[in-house]
């Protein structure tokens, strides 16, 4: 009788080992890059397939932060498989590259500091160009609200305005009121509006 009991326990051992490996794998595979919109609101980046419409274009970028203005061109390719942004100076030389594939954000630059967190750039891009229903659900999970009024998007923390985005067929104006920066994108955005 004890021999049969021992045999049943040994037969169960491979099943237990497989369950342990499967449960460990599912914990690590669900990690997604994120950015903090406020000191407490963590926004997990949406998967690439959440983009409203694919884009493959050059954009003119003008940004302001801390009383300083910055200008650049950006080549942007984004679709359901991921996103690639190459920042170019006025001579067309690369100043930095960002790529996003859903589970990783990569950034390389000889101009910008290594401390620059590319997840924040990807998050801003998603606020501008990703499906509004997906954004609403993700932001709600962070305790924030996405309001949409025509082609304007606003992200609020309670009554406090955090981000405001104005979209047009040839430009996008992004203002982060909380962090104190703003930028404008100019290009042919026709067909990318919702």
Image: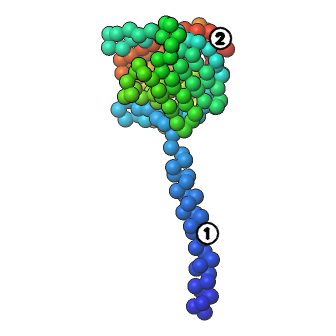
Q: Please identify the quadrant where the C terminus is shown.
A: top right
Q: Quadrant of residue 36?
A: top left
Residue 155 visible in the snapshot = no
Nearer-the-camera pick, 141 or 191: 191
- Residue drawn at x 48%, y 10% is 89
According to the picture, the residue beneath numbered tag 1 turns out to be 15
- Residue drawn at x 39%, y 16% is 181
- Residue drawn at x 58%, y 26% is 83
Q: Is residue 130 above or below residue 3?
A: above
Q: Position of residue 127 (x, y in %)?
A: 52, 24
- Residue drawn at x 64%, y 31% is 81
Q: Is residue 1 above or below residue 71?
A: below
Does residue 143 appear left or right of residue 55 in this picture?
Answer: left
Q: Position of residue 79 (x, y in %)?
A: 64, 26
Does residue 45 appear left or right of residue 81 in this picture?
Answer: left
According to the picture, the residue beneath numbered tag 2 turns out to be 190
Give the SS element for disc 1.
Answer: helix
Inter-mark Cα distance, 2 to 1: 55 Å
Residue 63's label in the rendered image is none
Nearer-the-camera pick, 15 or 133: 15
Q: Earlier in the sequence, mark 2 or mark 1?
A: 1
Q: Position of residue 30 (x, y in %)?
A: 54, 45
């Amino acid at each position: 009788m004890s021999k049969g009991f021992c045999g049943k326990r040994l037969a169960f051992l491979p099943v237990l080992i497989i369950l342990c490996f499967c449960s460990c794998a599912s914990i690590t595979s669900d990690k997604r890059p994120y950015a903090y919109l406020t000191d407490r609101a963590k926004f997990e980046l949406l998967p690439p397939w959440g983009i409203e419409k694919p884009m493959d274009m050059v954009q003119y970028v003008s940004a302001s932060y801390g009383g300083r203005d910055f200008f650049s061109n950006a080549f942007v390719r984004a679709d359901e498989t991921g996103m690639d942004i190459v920042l170019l100076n006025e001579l067309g030389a690369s100043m930095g590259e960002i790529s996003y594939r859903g589970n990783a954000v990569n950034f390389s630059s000889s101009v910008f500091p290594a401390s620059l967190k590319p997840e924040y750039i990807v998050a801003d891009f998603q606020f501008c160009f990703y499906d509004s229903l997906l954004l609403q659900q993700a932001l709600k999970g962070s305790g924030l609200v996405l309001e949409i009024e025509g082609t304007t998007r606003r992200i609020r923390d309670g009554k406090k305005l955090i981000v405001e985005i104005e979209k047009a067929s040839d430009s996008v104006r992004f203002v982060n009121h909380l962090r104190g920066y703003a930028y404008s994108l100019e290009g042919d955005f026709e067909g990318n509006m919702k």
